[in-house]
Amino acid sequence: MSVLIVGTTALDSIKTPKAENPRLLGGSASHAAVAASFFSPVKLVGGVGEDFPKKYIALYRRHKIDLEGLEILPGKTFHWSGEYELNMNNRRTLATELGVIETFSPTLPKSYQTAPFVLLGNIAPALQHRVLDQMQRPKFVVADSMDLWLNIALDDLLKLLPRIDGFVLNDSEGHQLTKEDNVFTALKKIHALGPKYVIIKKGSHGSILSGPKGFFICPAYPLSKVVDPTGAGDSFVGGMMGFLASAKGPIDANIRRAMVYGSVTASFCCEGFGLTRTTKIKRADIEKRVKELEKLTKF
Amino acid sequence: MSVLIVGTTALDSIKTPKAENPRLLGGSASHAAVAASFFSPVKLVGGVGEDFPKKYIALYRRHKIDLEGLEILPGKTFHWSGEYELNMNNRRTLATELGVIETFSPTLPKSYQTAPFVLLGNIAPALQHRVLDQMQRPKFVVADSMDLWLNIALDDLLKLLPRIDGFVLNDSEGHQLTKEDNVFTALKKIHALGPKYVIIKKGSHGSILSGPKGFFICPAYPLSKVVDPTGAGDSFVGGMMGFLASAKGPIDANIRRAMVYGSVTASFCCEGFGLTRTTKIKRADIEKRVKELEKLTKF
């Protein structure tokens, strides 16, 4: 089955003490869509400017991503630039140029409106609502978010939560939303806001699912070197939704394995700047790491 | 088989905004010994003062801990007092009174010298050396440590590492020792210092083993409420060594499961002040949580 993915489609300029990586393909929708594409057909929703490089359109196409919902708008593509410190742990934003995304409001093509799986990737909650408003009874809807929306669009976000099946956020956002330090208590409080499935991401420490069948402790694939974690969270949720859309049977029977596939897809994302590493792998590379993770967690 | 455990035997006064818990039984050896006692016979090595409460001797005895190596010395028992903030995350030391531990130097009873499993719990590396000097070809030796010894006794610690089979430390100590942020890189660097097995503890994020059979990602048992994490690391390594000493077959066949048993024993430790919760459980309670952890990590 197909996954509709909305989110930002951006150009990311990532500077490190050793190199500059100008105008890489980035944005939550790009990362999630490429990750999901290893498992299922993807329908992308986003807006880019007239400056959006043709090579990135070709990249989406190589991943068989449906671009009917990608609008090319007058103006410039959303551009983010940031700089990493030598240890790659601290990142600071140098510039954020919203460009066309400032006024972007998605209108879904008819063929998109019946997609059974919907990933509302990290973008303003108002746009996540707008996409959901145009959908016809999707089977499974998951939303991702970020601290920015908790700060400036909390009401919109809180109204979104009862409309979705699953909500994905990181541990600091979980704390911000619930005022709870404890992940497991935070998870329970987030259920009370609406979603049946809540996933808290903990970076290299893996992630925790709370759902109708209880908790699942999902490992992260061990990486000795992280080149660029930008987009890892989007790759995780994209890979997860792609896998879920490809799997037979109920969500509960597949979601744990889907998270592991998402986790492994995110591990590749971290090994290169932007999407440079993720776009070089094959499904077989993912399968290999999933098998390794099985061995690494068995007791 | 039996486990010899050396470490501090202390009285801990733990203050919180809601309660005072004066002079609880504490210290690395106490926590590790009680944890190990659920699985194997324990031989305790330590020194206490004449003020050491008889009820704590009785507590050790209830756990069938061999006290031939517990010396009662003229003076006062090592006393630590600390205070937690309301969210239980930040702890500050109010006072450290070393008492008899300042000049303590263990002399092992003859019956201790052939113990097959040795846990050099957190105490000055010079004392860990001294215990090892008196042992006759132990089968498996593991040492724990803390940031204090990395700061003030690094040479002693570095000389200890080639003498032991396994080394256990937490992630910040791993970083301090190797200058590596990445856990997996830090693990490799620590192998080069001597130990064949290295375990990095990550608190509520679980722990990572690096050994001859590669990595193992060990989960932490999910706790919605942490009352007092004091001694959790000691309980982890104590439970692990107790389980290893009870298991048939080679270390490599048992160490992963041993870590899970240690992790679960530590979870009980966190649910009460000092040893109050751990001393109320039975082996069956541990088994129940190990089974739960199996379910929580399966995919």
Image (spheres, coloured by chain):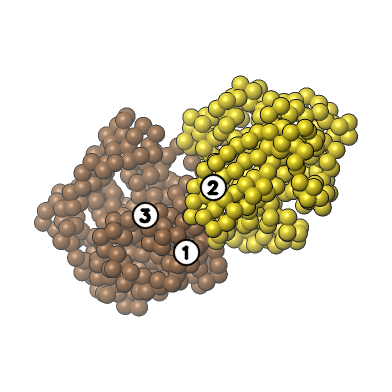
Chain colours: A brown, B yellow
Q: Which comes sooner in the sequence, label 1 or label 3?
A: 1
For disc 1, the neighbor class at 10 Å (few under 14, some 14 to 19, many from 20) is many
Q: Look at the picture and state if A152 lies above or below A94.
A: below
Whether labels 3 and 2 share one chain: no
Going by the numbered disc 3, the residue's amino acid type is Asp
Report in which chain the residue with disc 3 lies: A
Going by the numbered disc 2, the residue's amino acid type is Glu
Report in which chain the residue with disc 2 lies: B
Report in which chain the residue with disc 1 lies: A
Q: Tell me the element at label 1.
A: helix
**Foreground residue among A240 and B271:** B271
Q: Residue, x 65% and y 33% (percent of image)? A: B98
Q: Position of residue A243 (x, y in %)?
A: 45, 61
Q: Position of residue A267 (x, y in %)?
A: 45, 47
Tell me, for residue B168, which label it has, or none.
Answer: none
Q: Tell me the element at label 3.
A: helix
Tell me, for residue A234, which label it has, or none.
Answer: 3
Q: Residue, x 31% and y 78% (percent of image)? A: A136
Q: Are marks 3 and 2 in contact (CB under 8 Å)?
A: no
Q: Position of residue A157 (x, y in %)?
A: 31, 67
Marks 1/3: CA–CA distance: 20 Å
Which residue lies under the disc numbered 1?
A187
Going by the numbered disc 1, the residue's amino acid type is Leu
Which residue lies under the disc numbered 2?
B83
